[in-house]
Amino acid sequence: MWDCVIIGGGAAGLSAGLVLGRARRRTLLVDAGEQSNLAAHGIGGLLGHDGRPPAELYAAGRRELASYPSVEYRTAEVIGGACVGQVFELMSADGRRERTRRILLATGMEYRPPPVPGLARLWGASVFHCPFCHGWEVRDQPLAVLARGETAVHASLLLRGWSDDIVLLTDGPAHISEEEYARLAAAGVAVDERPVTEIVSSHGELAAIAFSDSGRLERRGLMVATTLYQRSSLAEQLGVELAEPTPVTAERISVDALCRTSAPGVFAAGDLGAETPQVAAVIASGSLAAAAVVQSLLADDVGLPVPEWSHHVNA
Ligand SMILES: Cc1cc2nc3c(=O)[nH]c(=O)nc-3n(C[C@H](O)[C@H](O)[C@H](O)COP(=O)(O)OP(=O)(O)OC[C@H]3O[C@@H](n4cnc5c(N)ncnc54)[C@H](O)[C@@H]3O)c2cc1C
């Protein structure tokens, strides 16, 4: 019987594993090894690791966990979970079954950028979803935003912080109001509504955007509106409630201030409960969630006072 099984070994899960190991909790960390930022050359904006290749950070995290004898790291995919009485049973794709007192979901999210030909090969480099992660690398360059509606206005004005030369590409009707057109024009953002047919690259970098009328727009960076979805049905199987969808996160898990989900015994950390997905933030939430797990176990074992399991999860 584990004290806690952490599902997912990205920045959130590894951070949680470290805190649980230091609290001497019998912890199993199961990871399928597909952290969402592996395509990026470096992690932008992480103190102490700015620009470090993501895979290096995860390897360092796994090395740190190895010092703690109560933590086991396993490469596998959890495919099923259920609460049976007072404990949880989990099943992996390799057929292994585990029993645990707590579950910490840290499975990350599936980022879905628009399915434009040529985009995937530049994803995480000169095509990106977050200016705080990748804006510095394309600062003062000719940039574009690919989005529609309110999201497009927000993204274009945000990216103005990194360049004066921004074109908003709406790939068809922009779905923005006269007032929003005026606000973009006042900020020096041009709007191009031609259908986009291809993201053109040269030597692994963005070169241009191609349109259906055979026109091209040369650009060095492209920010795309991206929506985040759950990677699996695990949250649903465990009866965890989702928050209201937003333009960024379609299927965010609802958590309270202690990373507790609506299902008692199930905690969530990282992208899957976040509105602003960033490595620094998910490391913090993994740490917080693990501290909450430890305290909830001590509440059961020795009567440590903890706040009632909240039904007022942030929706
Ligand atoms: C292309 C790209 C570039 C980015 N660049 C930056 C950047 O420069 N700076 C920054 O701060 N943020 C960046 N981000 C955001 C950042 O990567 C995420 O916020 C962060 O990785 C989320 O961490 P996480 O631990 O929640 O999830 P993840 O890193 O996605 O890790 C989740 C892990 O859980 C595993 N998993 C999922 N389901 C299961 C299962 N059923 N069983 C077992 N394991 C499972 C996955 O395989 C994965 O290894 C970027 C995101 C993307 C997509």
Image (cartoon, helix red, strand yellow):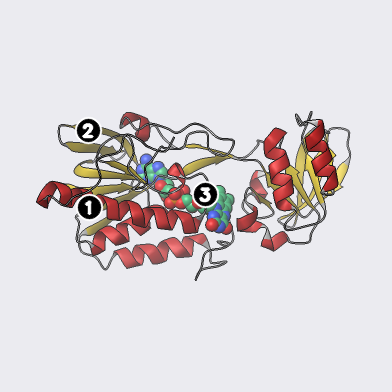
What residue would you read off at disc 2? 83
What residue would you read off at disc 3? 277
User: Which sits in the foreground, 256 or 155?
Assistant: 256
Q: Quadrant of the C terminus?
A: top left
What residue would you read off at disc 1? 295
Q: Which x, y percent locates residue 69?
A: 20, 64
Residue at image location 25% in from the left, 32% down from the top? 82
Residue at the bottom extreme, as displayed = 48
- Badge nearest the viewer, 1 or 2: 1
CA–CA distance between discs 1 and 3? 26 Å
CA–CA distance between discs 2 and 3? 29 Å
* Residue 81 sits in quarter: top left
Q: Residues within 10 Å of mark 3 (few under 14, many from 20)?
A: some
* Label 1 C-beta lies within 8 Å of the nearest ligand 1 atom: no
* Label 2 C-beta lies within 8 Å of the nearest ligand 1 atom: no
First of labels 1, 2 by sequence position:
2
Q: Secondary structure at mark 3?
A: loop
**Is the residue 187 above or below the residue 244 in the image?**
below
The amino acid pointed to by label 1 is Gln
**Is the residue 80 above or below the residue 69 in the image?**
above
First of labels 1, 3 by sequence position:
3
CA–CA distance between discs 1 and 2? 20 Å
Q: Which x, y percent locates residue 94?
A: 29, 40
Q: Residues within 10 Å of mark 1 (few under 14, many from 20)?
A: some
Task: Tell me whether circle 1 and circle 2 mark residues in contact (CB < 8 Å).
Answer: no
